[in-house]
Amino acid sequence: MSTTTSVPVLSVAPVVLSTPDRAVDLQLRVSAPTTGGDLPVILLSHGQGPSNHLSSLNGYAPLVNFWAAHGFVVIQPTHLSSRTLNLAPGEPEAPLYPRSRAEDLSRILDRLDEIEDAVPWLRGRLDRGKVAVAGHSMGGHTASLLLGARYSDPSSGEEVDLAEPRISAGVLLAAPGRGGDAVTEFVAENYSFFLSTDFSAMTTPALVVAGDKDASPHLTIRGPEWHTDPYFLAPGRKTLLTLFGAEHGLGGISGYDVAETTDENPERVAAVQHLTWAYLRSELYPGDAAWRTACDGLTLGRVEAK
């Protein structure tokens, strides 16, 4: 399917998976094209931010609708960190729940049969051998863990390894970089798991998308280059897309007309839609020319690969 071939999309939410070992049951949105079979899957992890509903299964419509209209099944969980759940601050791992967020995505893959039962028109249409993960901001940290990044649990000192072998490729959108002296005192005091972020085992192929104006001063002292760490510090086949003039919202990917987007730019959002789709097409289907074609027409940023 090409970017010029768009089909209607059906979206079902909430799909609820009973999870007695979790603070609340896992709620999902499932979006898919109305036609086609052997559909690859994207697991999408939301970020945080000040809005009430973008950090849930209801966010990221610009990406979700595009990906689904062009041949992917997109599954979005509401992580325990979501403002929509308003969980008590004393919950273990609060407020950002780094381990739980990654476990949500593996749980989805464990329970695809249940998801298909809950969405009957999807039954038998998934290609379970072609799975990708994507995430924005904190969701990028979550996605990186499934791709092989690690951190040390602040409570136990245990190295947390949540790499997911069923995932073949990833897209990290404005994702956090390394820890240590790269993060601010605010992060060290409030989100100490970030201090130990380590990309040295993140071997799964990934596209890292970073804005060259994404300073994120509340998170890092290094400025925009911090968001390129998953590219430069991870081994294996990686690709970096740097978007000119983009800040943390990458033009507005978290929702349509979102007030918190500081760099609203529909053309930039369209580029992110197209390029992320094309990257995943070419990674999941070797020989597919979508990525090469998309890069040939790129004017809003630059691409490098290793």
Image (tube, rainbow, N blue to C red):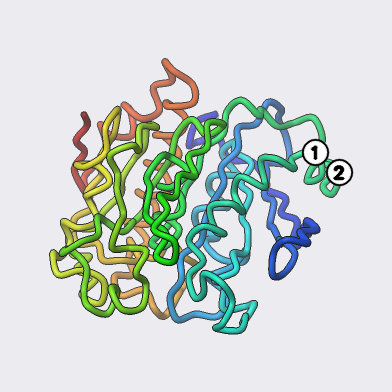
Q: Is residue 106 above or below residue 191?
A: above
Look at the numbered disc 2 and give the secondary structure of its residue.
helix
Say which of 72 and 208 sits in front: 208
Compute the Cα span from label 1 to label 2.
6 Å
Question: Which image quadrant: the N terminus?
Answer: top right
Mark number, residue 113:
1
> Is there CB contact under 8 Å for labels 1 and 2?
yes
Q: Give the residue type at disc 1.
A: Asp
Image quadrant assignment for residue 193: bottom left
The residue at the point 45 percent across, 39 percent down is: 277
The residue at the point 35 percent across, 32 percent down is: 203
Instruction: Give the residue at the far top of this rendering.
Output: 287
The residue at the point 80 percent across, 58 percent down is: 18
x, y percent for residue 173: 36, 53
Q: Is residue 155 above or below residue 283?
A: below
Q: Is residue 292 above or below residue 163?
A: above
The residue at the point 18 percent across, 55 percent down is: 244
Other residues around mark 2 within 10 Å, as few (<14) / some (14–19) / many (≥20): few
x, y percent for residue 305: 22, 32
Question: Which image quadrant: the C terminus?
Answer: top left
Mark number, residue 117:
2
Say which of 218 and 242 sits in front: 218
Q: Give the residue type at disc 2.
A: Asp
Please indicate whether residue 178 sits to the left or right of residue 159 in the image.
Answer: left
x, y percent for residue 71: 60, 36
Please indicate whether residue 281 sits to the left or right of residue 52 in the image.
Answer: left
Other residues around mark 1 within 10 Å, as few (<14) / some (14–19) / many (≥20): few
Say which of 16 and 70 sits in front: 16
x, y percent for residue 7: 64, 41
Image quadrant assignment for residue 154: bottom left
Look at the numbered disc 1 and give the secondary structure of its residue.
helix
